[in-house]
Image: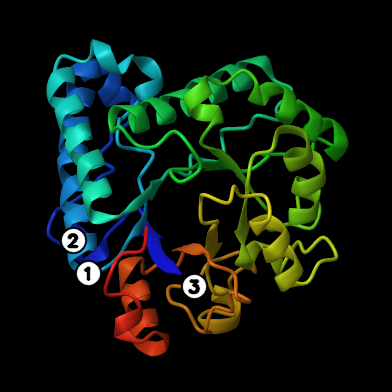
Amino acid sequence: MNLGYACINMELSGKGISTNRGMIKKTFLAKGKEYAAELALKNLQDLKTVLEWNIENSIFVYRMSSCLFPWMSEYEFKDLHNYDDILKMCKEIGQLSKDGGIRLSFHPGHFDILATNNPDALERTVRDLNQHAQIMDMMDLRADHYNTINIHVGGAYGDKTSALKRFCENFGLLQLSARKRLTVENDDKVNMYSVNDLYEGVYKEIKIPIIFDFHHHRMCDGNLTERQALELAASTWPSSVRPLTHYSSSKKFNEDETSNKQAHADYLYEEINTYGCNIDIELEAKAKEQALLKYRKDYISEICYATKEL
């Protein structure tokens, strides 16, 4: 397996390296897309630095921040005054990821809801997912599930069957490069979507892969064991792409008993059981790459992660 982490590099952020420079709406209204373009270029430059750090530290799975382009819903990338510089940097990032064997992904926020019955929310969702795909296209990343754009169904609305049907219908509104990359993830509440729900209601209809989240499954198991759920999710992936999964330990049971049970711990407190599945894992521990490095030290021989596996 390859281990990765999400967005923030704790070591580099202490040195001012950031990929999520943004601004409040008041600032955007005052300074406009010109300032957003400047921040975007800086975010991309620092993303390249993060990827170089990952390669040096034999980390080959990485989730990019969805905040690379501040307020991107308010403009088209090609209309930015420094678009040529942005595109050049995107291509450098894409080439670096290919040369270094780094698998890149996105996980847009909870406001992207394909199952929504609100037309305005759906329009915003489609635009946002399409723009995530456009960023990957600008990086010349593969338009398949190796470079995923992962979301949740987003709501049950009192009728899970109808919500799943809307999700599948609205999937067709996305541009092709977004559809080719989209994956769906199981939830962490019993009234939401288990792996089994997603298999029956999404995969069987539109054939998009399921990202298995170990931590979420502990709270919404769909009457499947962890092994059964992992294997079912893994079976939805094409044979040419290693399944991507998420893992975190419980904060409530390991660090702070006053936390809610959905909270992720800073570090990992148990060895990950892959049940023999050949998977990639994005760690969602709050200590980011520091949690990954500690986990490798505690559980994995150095020879197992020193070289990339494509």
Residue at (46, 46) in percent of width and height: 146
Measured from the top left, where is residue 183 in percent x and y? Answer: 58, 42
The answer to whether one can see residue 159 in this image is: no
Q: Nearer the viewer, mark 1 or mark 3?
A: 1
Q: Is residue 213 above or below residue 156?
A: below
Asked whether the residues under the numbered discs 1 and 2 touch, taking CB atoms below 8 Å apart as contact, a structural biologist would say yes
Q: Quadrant for the C terminus, please.
A: bottom left
What's the CA distance linking mark 2 and mark 3? 24 Å
Helix, strand or loop at mark 3: loop
Q: Residues within 10 Å of mark 2 (few under 14, many from 20)?
A: some
Per the image, the residue denoted by label 1 is 57
Q: Nearer the viewer, mark 2 or mark 3?
A: 2
Q: Amino acid at mark 3?
A: Ala
Q: Is residue 35 above or below residue 78?
A: below
Q: Nearer the viewer, residue 242 or 220?
A: 242
The answer to whether one can see residue 130 in this image is: yes
- Where, by quadrant of the figure, is residue 170 drawn? top right
Measured from the top left, where is residue 308 in percent x and y? Answer: 30, 64
Residue at (18, 61) in percent of width and height: 53
Tell me, for residue 235, which label it has, or none.
Answer: none
- Where, by quadrant of the figure, is residue 38 drawn? top left
Q: Amino acid at mark 2?
A: Trp
Tell me, for residue 53, which label it has, or none.
Answer: 2
